[in-house]
Amino acid sequence: MSGWITQQGPQNEIVLTSRVRLARNIANTPFPAYLSMDDANKLISQVETAARKNDKVSYQLYTMDKMSYLDKQVLLEKHLISPDLVKSSKGAALISENELISIMINEEDHIRIQAILPGFQMHNAWAMANDVDDTLEETLDYTYDEKLGYLTCCPTNVGTGMRASAMVHLPALNMIGNISKILQTVTQIGLTIRGIYGEGTEFLGNLFQISNQITLGLSEEEIVENINAVTTQIVEKEKEARNILLNNNRVQLEDRVWRAWGILKNARVISSQEAMKLLSDVRLGMDLNIIDNLSVSLLNEIMIETQPASIQKYAGEELSPDARDIIRAEIIRKKL
């Protein structure tokens, strides 16, 4: 199980993860979309050899064209690879033993380095990603321009090639009706809000990813500081909203939490969307000490293990949506 799922981090009651991703390309080499399969495989080998020079990190190589669609989806559900890599027949991923580092190869760019940590640890995530980047750069010749910075397939990543993001749980802001205002403010200051699995995905379980949009004209440290500052303000707003709910609507809040707990503990059929909504209520109840004897890691495990591909991996076979809903309920009952 991924380290970000099983471990706890600072302010884990609101910030689930801190993640930094760096996009890099190899000089004098066509972008992945234009690589032949042979050249794509050679590039995978080059990146693997470079990464393994750091003997402090143990990697496992996952080659997309040799994996089942289900296994690729499981990695996606654990936030270890991207939707674009799942679709790539030329792609691969080097994933560290603790699953806190992943190096995606031949996605949109030749290399996407990702570090993901539990809780609010943006600086540590940046340091971890930067360390991997330095190791690769000792061997690989990156495409870099003195004026523009790192050159990438998509112009929106040119510059630092960095995307820094915090995944935050904001149920109270949603309950008191302030979430739209917060999200609108975030987008007005050059940041963006994405769903649980990144760009173009749904907002599920009151989980939102806050990330930078601008990669050119700012240093990596400035990007991390911006995300840090905005996330800190949002965390404070969520805490204020939680206090409002406790002080003004405690009975109604407790009722909502215990109803969610009762359904999760007893349901025989439950959809993915309903499970995420109810897990959000229970997570809030745990954070506010309404429910005892629960841990962040347990709720994280349930959240990931009840996603569609993970359920089918658990069952050992492909399942219809109706069958998945039955097994999802069974997993949740056992875990709780």
Image: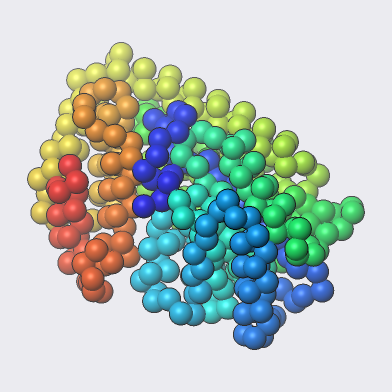
Residue at image location 38% in from the left, 45% down from the top: 5
Q: Is residue 288 shown left or right of residue 32?
A: left
Q: Residue at x 32, y 65 (%)?
A: 309
The quadrant where residue 45 appears? bottom right
Q: Is residue 243 above or below residue 24?
A: above
In the figure, 30 relative to 247: above or below? below
Q: Is residue 152 visible?
A: no
Q: At 27% from the left edge and 29% from the top edge, which residue is drawn?
A: 286
Write down the quadrant of residue 152 in the picture. Answer: bottom right
Color scheme of the displayed model: rainbow
| Quadrant of the frame with the C terminus | top left
Which one is nearer the viewer's eye here, 22 or 165? 22
Where in the figure is residue 215, as x and y percent of width and height? 73, 48
- Extreme-top residue of the structure: 247
Is 119 drawn above or below residue 21 in the view shown?
above
> Please, which residue is most extreme toward the front here?
55
- Image spot of residue 180 (x, y percent): 48, 36
The one of 67 and 333 positioned closer to us in this rendering: 67
- In this view, the residue farthest toward the right is 146
Side of 60 where 313 appears, left or right: left
Picture coordinates of residue 129, whole percent (x, y): 63, 48
Q: Can the viewer see residue 334?
A: yes
Count of marks placed on residues: 0
Give residue 205's position: percent from left, percent from top: 35, 44
Q: Residue at x 25, y 74 (%)?
A: 318
